[in-house]
């Protein structure tokens, strides 16, 4: 069990990063234009953070062992083809994105080994 101060610190970080603002904005008397502008800013910020996390992940995958990469491929296969489950476009897209990230990491791996990026 985590200490209360650790939980409080985690929640504080979440709030300072903007994650808790959306519910408060919806409950107030926010004008629709202001809400749309705020939501657009949040989406833009989320996009920037996603690009940063993807870039870090690709860098880490580029230096991963072949066993780790194979496990990632297996997970992508599992996500895209779960037996007995209806295939939803979002899940298929997620699996495709996982494979795409692995391919990008492979290109970066070659660059780490002295090849040019292609």
Image: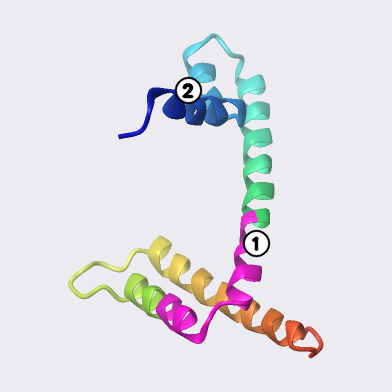
From this view, report whether residue 6 is shown above or below residue 102.
Answer: above
Q: Earlier in the sequence, mark 1 or mark 2?
A: 2
- Between 87 and 55, the one nearer to me in the picture: 55
Q: How far apart are the two marked residues, 1 and 2, measured between alpha carbons? A: 30 Å
- The answer to whether residue 13 is seen in the rendering is yes
> What residue is shown with label 2?
23
Q: Position of residue 23 (x, y in %)?
A: 47, 22
- Out of 23 and 18, give the one closest to the viewer: 18
Task: Specify whether residue 61 is painted magenta.
Answer: yes
Kindly identify the residue that appears in the image at 36 percent across and 73 percent down.
80
Looking at the image, which residue sits at the far top? 29
Which residue occupies 51% across, 77% down?
99
Q: Position of residue 68 (x, y in %)?
A: 46, 78
Q: Quadrant of the C terminus?
A: bottom right
Q: Which residues are magenta?
A: 53-73
Quarter of the image that includes the N terminus: top left
Q: Residues within 10 Å of mark 1 (few under 14, many from 20)?
A: few
Is residue 19 visible in the rendered image? The answer is no
Q: Secondary structure at mark 2?
A: helix
């Amino acid at each position: 069990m985590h200490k209360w101060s650790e939980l409080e610190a985690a929640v504080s970080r979440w709030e300072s990063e903007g994650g808790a603002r959306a519910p408060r904005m919806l409950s107030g008397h926010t004008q629709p234009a202001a809400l749309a502008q705020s939501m657009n800013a949040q989406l833009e910020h989320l996009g920037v953070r996603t690009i940063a996390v993807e870039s870090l992940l690709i860098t880490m995958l580029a230096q991963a062992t072949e066993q780790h990469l194979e496990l990632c491929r297996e997970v992508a296969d599992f996500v895209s083809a779960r037996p007995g489950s209806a295939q939803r476009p979002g899940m298929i897209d997620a699996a495709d994105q996982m494979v795409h990230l692995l391919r990008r990491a492979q290109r970066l791996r070659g660059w780490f080994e002295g090849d040019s990026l292609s």
